């Protein structure tokens, strides 16, 4: 991997992890355009590095929220922070089940299948379009709604379905306050990212050479900076009901991916 490729893919990961346009889908498309049809599988170290970068950017943006949650948990009481953490755990269960028991089936959907990716991007576009037109009733995240959002996150493991787009759209369609929807969406994925990184490290099979140090470092910085900007921007966009612009974008990219895939 060249430094240029590392910069581009790092920025792609950082932006699309938070913007509702599907990071996995864009990495698949970018991998095909850069001559690698299965980049995440061929370079596990790269995947770990950029995901760690986006996890770190999430921690930085929500450092006060995370700090308050940790303080509340260490009080060992059934308080607001404990309830919120419990709902985060519940929302993770569907994705964890899919990841543990259907990993091989899920992996088969990756590997440059950009027609499928394009189709899933069109579904993401529909979700975003509907969410932008939903009324903001200001409701909180309840236990039942957390579970429903968790199922949306599990579906978003498909390449082309935006995780943030699916979870935020589902939250808004359930009537949850848009600011709280964005906050819950970004915080609920943090344990999953960290858990996935830990699982990949424990599974072994990592390949690394000294020649990859610079590209990996550049990818980390690119993903981290892009992630900070995208996360902050996305929170404001959700509050202002500006998701339609991403619906249009996903539609355009999805159609291009489908056409390109059919012509290849």
Image (cartoon, rainbow, N blue to C red):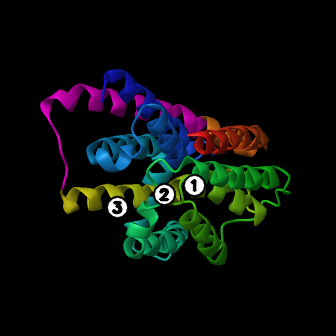
Residue behind mark 2: 189
- State whether residue 180 appears in this view: no
Q: Most prominent secondary structure in the magenta stretch?
A: helix
Does the stretch in magenta take in 226?
A: yes
Q: Nearer the viewer, residue 43 or 192?
A: 43
Q: Nearer the viewer, residue 27 or 110?
A: 110
Q: Do callouts 1 and 2 mark residues in contact (Cβ within 8 Å)?
A: yes
Q: CA distance from mark 3 to mark 1?
A: 16 Å
Does the stretch in magenta take in 54?
A: no
Q: Horizontal and vertical percent for residue 230? A: 56, 35
Q: CA distance from mark 3 to mark 2?
A: 10 Å
Q: Horizontal and vertical percent for residue 241? A: 79, 44
Image vertical order of residue 52 relative to residue 214, above or below: below
Q: Horizontal and vertical percent for residue 215? A: 28, 28
| Mark nearer the viewer, 1 or 2 | 1
Looking at the rendered structure, the number of numbered marks drawn on it comes to 3
Q: Do callouts 3 and 2 mark residues in contact (Cβ within 8 Å)?
A: no
What is the secondary structure assignment of the residue under circle 3? helix
Q: Which residues are magenta?
A: 205-232
Residue behind mark 3: 195
What is the secondary structure assignment of the residue under circle 1? helix
């Amino acid at each position: 991997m060249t430094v240029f490729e590392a910069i581009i893919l790092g920025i792609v990961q950082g932006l699309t992890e938070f913007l509702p346009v599907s990071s996995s889908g864009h990495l698949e498309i970018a991998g095909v355009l850069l001559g690698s049809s299965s980049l995440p599988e061929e370079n596990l170290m790269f995947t770990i590095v950029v995901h760690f970068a986006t996890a770190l950017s999430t921690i930085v943006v929500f450092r006060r929220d995370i700090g308050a949650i940790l303080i509340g948990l260490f009080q060992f009481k059934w308080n607001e922070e404990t309830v919120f953490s419990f709902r985060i755990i519940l929302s993770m269960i569907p994705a964890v089940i899919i990841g543990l028991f259907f990993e091989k089936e899920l992996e088969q959907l990756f590997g440059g299948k950009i027609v499928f990716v394009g189709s899933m991007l069109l579904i993401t576009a529909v979700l975003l379009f509907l969410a932008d037109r939903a009324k903001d009733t200001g409701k909180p995240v309840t236990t039942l709604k957390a579970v429903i959002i968790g199922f949306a996150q599990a579906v978003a493991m498909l390449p082309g379905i935006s995780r943030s787009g699916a979870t935020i759209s589902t939250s808004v369609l359930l009537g949850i306050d848009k600011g709280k929807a964005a906050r819950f969406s970004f915080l609920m994925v943090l344990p999953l990212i960290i858990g996935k990184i830990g699982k990949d490290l424990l599974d072994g099979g990592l390949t690394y050479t000294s020649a990859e140090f610079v590209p990996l470092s550049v990818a980390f910085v690119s993903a981290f900076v892009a992630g900070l900007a995208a996360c902050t921007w996305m929170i404001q966009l959700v509050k202002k009901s500006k998701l339609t612009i991403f619906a249009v974008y996903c539609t355009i990219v999805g159609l291009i991916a489908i056409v390109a895939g059919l012509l290849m």
